[in-house]
Image (cartoon, helix red, strand yellow):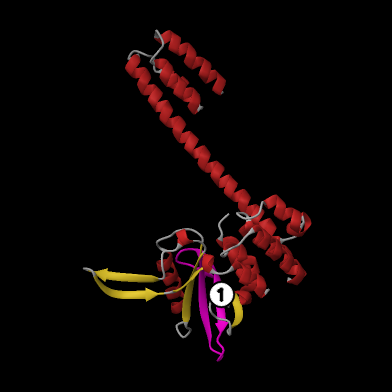
Amino acid sequence: MQTDIPLKRLMALRGADLLPLLGLPAATLVRVESRELPASATRLDTVLRIRSPQGQEYLHLVEWQGYRDPTVLWRLAGYMAWFGQQEPATVVVGTVVYLAPDHDVGDTLIQQVDGQVVQTWSFSRIRLWEQDAAAALASANLGLVVLSPLMHNASAPLVQQAIEVVLQQAPQTEQGDLLSILGAFAVPLLNPQRFIDLVGKEKLMSSEFFDYLMQEYTAEFKEREAALLAQLRQQETEFQQLLEDAVLVRFPDAPLSLVQDIRRVNHAGQLRRLVMAVQQVSDLSEFEQLLHTAADNST
């Protein structure tokens, strides 16, 4: 599961809670918007429409970065440019939130020609691991409480305290989703079964986000399964070709019908053993017997 899925859901549920994290404690969240970017067929879910303390509305784009991507600042710049074209009278700002040190590629795009800086673009940057988990928990701000497992000095006891805060303070309609998101972030700190025992399976299963997570896990499993099958098929094809070449080298007068039998063998391990066998058998008839047996076992 990609980390941006629970982060975007958290933003939709508790966007106002996360304004202090973005350095906007006095601002007001008007709404969280979801926009389709037609050029890339990508949906951007972390668009905040903010009202400043003096009443000005503007857009604040948040890019949650859970893996290292050298293009993240260009991507954020592209989003900001697209929104600027759609609403040219609206101020558009952007923040990249890095979840771990390895993900951090900076906050400034620097363009140089012959070693001379010709242009720079700077963005607001938040290093989530530098935020204090205990302070987030003490704030009783539900959005920050749910993010606390990703912060500095997070621990299993802190996760347990975070569960209690959510259970005590979150509206019943949000508890299931917030706990499911908290559980996704807490995996490195707290055994998932222990988390379920603390929260209660019924509470998690009542969450719409839990259903969404299950769909994501299922989709990821199917994707990995498909990739593995494709890899195995590629290996089989390569071993089949290798076996055909080995047979032609050892037995130049072998009948073409052997190729059909070779292609009936659909197990990489069997094909590898046959490649070795073709070099060791005493004659063609001995190899044909081994090949026919392997082909029959593959059907």
Question: Is residue 148 in sight in this rendering?
Answer: yes
Q: Residue 44's x, y, as percent?
A: 53, 68
At horizontal 40% and vertical 63% (from top left) the residue drawn is 71
Residue 45 magenta-highlighted: yes
At horizontal 45% and vertical 19% (from top left) the residue drawn is 274
Quarter of the image with the C terminus is top right
Q: Residue 248's x, y, as percent?
A: 34, 18
Instruction: Look at the picture and state if 56 lies above or below 84.
Output: below
Which is the main secondary structure of the residues drawn in magenta?
strand
Instruction: Look at the picture and state if 178 lies above or below 217.
Output: below
At horizontal 47% and vertical 61% (from top left) the residue drawn is 101
Q: Which residues are magenta?
A: 35-64
Instruction: Look at the picture and state if 11 lies above or below 89.
Output: above
Q: How many marks?
A: 1
Q: Residue 256's x, y, as percent?
A: 39, 18
Residue 245 magenta-highlighted: no
Mark 1 surroundings: few (<14), some (14-19) or many (≥20) residues within 10 A: some
Amino acid on which the number 1 mark rests in the picture: Leu
Would you identify the image quadrant in which residue 205 lies? bottom right
At horizontal 70% and vertical 61% (from top left) the residue drawn is 160
Q: Is residue 293 left or right of residue 167?
A: left
Question: Is residue 144 in sight in this rendering?
Answer: no
Where is mark 1, residue-wise?
Answer: 21
The answer to which of 174 and 49 lies nearer the viewer is 174
Q: Residue furthest bottom?
A: 54
